[in-house]
Image (spheres, rainbow, N blue to C red):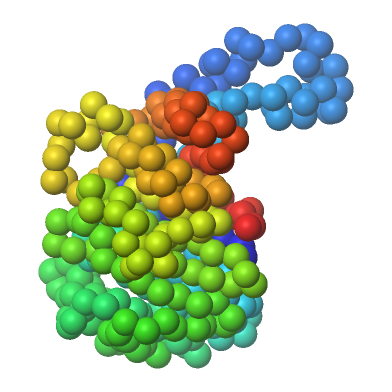
Amino acid sequence: MKFRFWGVRGSLPCPETPEAVRAKVSTIINRVQSSDLVSPESRERFLAGLPPELFGSIGGNTTCFEVEGSPREILVVDAGTGLRELGTFYESSPSSPKHYHIFFTHFHWDHLQGLPFFQGLFQRGNTISFYSPMKGFEKWVRQQMDEPFFPVPLSVLPARMFFVELDEGPLVIAGTQVRWRSVNHPGSCVCYRFERDGKSLIFSTDTELRVVDFDKSPENLLFYDEVDVLVMDAQYTLDEAIERPDWGHSSSGLAVEFALDFHAKTLYLFHHEPNHDDSRIEEIGRLAQWYADHKRPGGLKVLVAREGRKGHKV
Ligand SMILES: [Zn+2]
Ligand SMILES: [Zn+2]
């Protein structure tokens, strides 16, 4: 099962500042040795040896995630600003019409604000199906495209649109099974579990883990246990989580505990705090891996979610 992160930031978009870009370039130049510059191969080796926080970026878009469907059936979770990049990727060259399936976790701004600039909506022949278990969610999606918030209402756009209120049962789209569960977040939120070709992935953004979430109830075990990939809200450090109870997000430490408790194989830290720059987030990732190894050596791979067209496979 393939998947891509199109937007990994929490709460609001965080474009790289000019100062941050200059600082990265300056640090790289200070590291380079004359022997690194003697050939194209040595230059590539030098660049490949740089830490990810220097050579690249985690990305600055808000939540948008893609999981494998088919060339014409695109499965997406949330419509944060990363959705604009996804639309550019699929719609920039003329091609056959597509069916986008957009699952919403909830309707906070950072999970909606890319929708007005999603090219898929502006392409005649496309179909967009929106999904959420929240009753009447069509009204909220339409409202944020109406005046005075945006000048072009959904009703005048050429793509065909459907709004599907999810019931309890699983859904299968283009060979991928989708299930959902409620998670703890102000105003309510859901996470999604995807299964395909014997592999499983849970996408759980905007989740403040509680003691009850760690219960080994049949429902929890059925949904969470032994998942191949767990993408989990890890917006805060432990200090920040203690200062912000009931803000609706988890610490990276708690995300590790949860992943270990339910025997996840790989954990992606997600919904990065806007006040953390790339190097801080990479440091949080390294600490989380150290903590996981301390608790259960070799038991869990911890990665930082990064935006990128290349994507991942499980
Ligand atoms: Zn959010
Ligand atoms: Zn939220």
Residue 105: x and y in percent read 31, 66
For residue 201, side relative to residue 156 (left or right)? right
| Residue 210 image point, x, y percent | 22, 48
* Among the 4 quarters of the image, the one containing residue 187: bottom left
Location of residue 276 (image quadrant): top left
Q: Residue at x 51, y 34 (%)?
A: 296
Q: Quadrant of residue 280?
A: top left
Which residue is depicted at the point 64% across and 12% down?
31
Left or right for 68, reference 6: right
Q: Camera-side residue: 148 or 172?
A: 172
Residue 37 left/right relative to 1: right
Looking at the image, residue 310 lies above or below residue 164: above
Q: Can residue 12 be seen here? A: no
Task: Give the residue displayed 22% in from the left and 35% down from the top.
Answer: 241
Residue 281 seen in render: yes
249 or 291: nearer the eye? Answer: 291
Above or below for 197 versus 311:
below
Q: Is residue 57 above or below residue 99?
A: above
Front residue of this view, candidates 80 and 104: 104
Residue 182 percent across, percent down from the top left: 26, 66
